[in-house]
Amino acid sequence: MNTIERLPEAYTDKKEAILKHGIYTFFKDEAAFENLKIERIFGFTVFLRYIREWKKICSVPVNRLLLISLTPINVYQNREKKKRKEKISKCIAFIKGHSGFVIYGAGHMAHIVASYCDMRKIRYEYFCVTHLDDRKKEYMGHPVKELAQVKEELHSNGILICMRGDYAEEVIDTLNTYGLSDNLYFDEELFGIMDSELNRRDTRRKKV
């Protein structure tokens, strides 16, 4: 931000640069500051230090930033804990609402979800992928199956999409064309929540 401000006023892209690299990046909403508050990065001292800069780099009103900076950390910690619990409960309710449960994907996110399921003793049938790699027909002790081979049986299963961004959107579009929109579940925030739970478990084990 300081580098951009030092550019000459005649610099034609100065305003665009401020918008692109300032307001609409990390500081785009209150949730970002609430997370920084939980991590003890943002507080009243930081708020005061940059009080003249917030309007330039942030779309959150200054009075809201002041409120966040003064609110006790435990308020946001409890709110975040409740949100995480609700997201996990909603996902598990979806799984229990189907006769079987399939993990779509066989990468890092799928590994997190499968590990979490193992920890919670939640049974899943297999991993499903759009295109099967002959070198990877098994993953974490479970079979990996190609979508084209199992698309009919998926109508009786719940499908948890375990990938991010454009990859997830592409898979969801594909499954929708097979009439599986009621069978799939996707919440990108789940991966971080489950990974955090797994890390806490590992930390407890190390202390024993």
Image (cartoon, grey):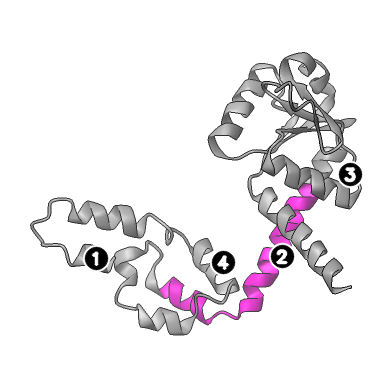
Can you identify the residue that label 3 sits on?
A: 122
Q: Secondary structure at mark 2?
A: helix
Judged left or right of residue 49, residue 132 is right
**Does 54 appear above or below 92?**
below
Cα separation between marks 2 and 3: 22 Å
Amino acid type of the residue tagged 2 in the rendering: Lys
Q: Residue at x 78, y 57 (%)?
A: 198
**Towards the viewer: 130 or 64:** 130
Q: Residue at x 23, y 51 (%)?
A: 16
Quadrant in which residue 61 is drawn: bottom left
The answer to which of marks 1 and 3 sits earlier in the sequence is 1
Can you identify the residue that label 4 sits on?
A: 35
Residue 119 point in image, percent of width and height: 87, 52
Amino acid type of the residue tagged 4 in the rendering: Asn
Residue 108 point in image, percent of width and height: 68, 43
Can you identify the residue that label 2 sits on?
A: 81
Cα separation between marks 1 and 3: 51 Å
For the residues carrying marks 1 and 3, which lies nearer the camera in this image? 1
Check residue 3 in the rendering and tell me which mark sits there, or answer none. Answer: 1
Quadrant of the rendering where the C terminus is positioned:
bottom right
Check residue 107 in the rendering and tell me which mark sits there, or answer none. Answer: none
Cα separation between marks 2 and 1: 38 Å
Judged left or right of residue 69, residue 92 is right
Amino acid type of the residue tagged 3 in the rendering: Ile
Residue 144 point in image, percent of width and height: 79, 27
The answer to which of marks 2 and 4 sits earlier in the sequence is 4
Mark 3 surroundings within 10 Å by alpha-carbon count, few (fewer than 14), some (14 through 19), many (20 or more): some
For the residues carrying marks 4 and 1, which lies nearer the camera in this image? 1
Q: Secondary structure at mark 4?
A: helix
Residue 98 showing in the rendered view: no
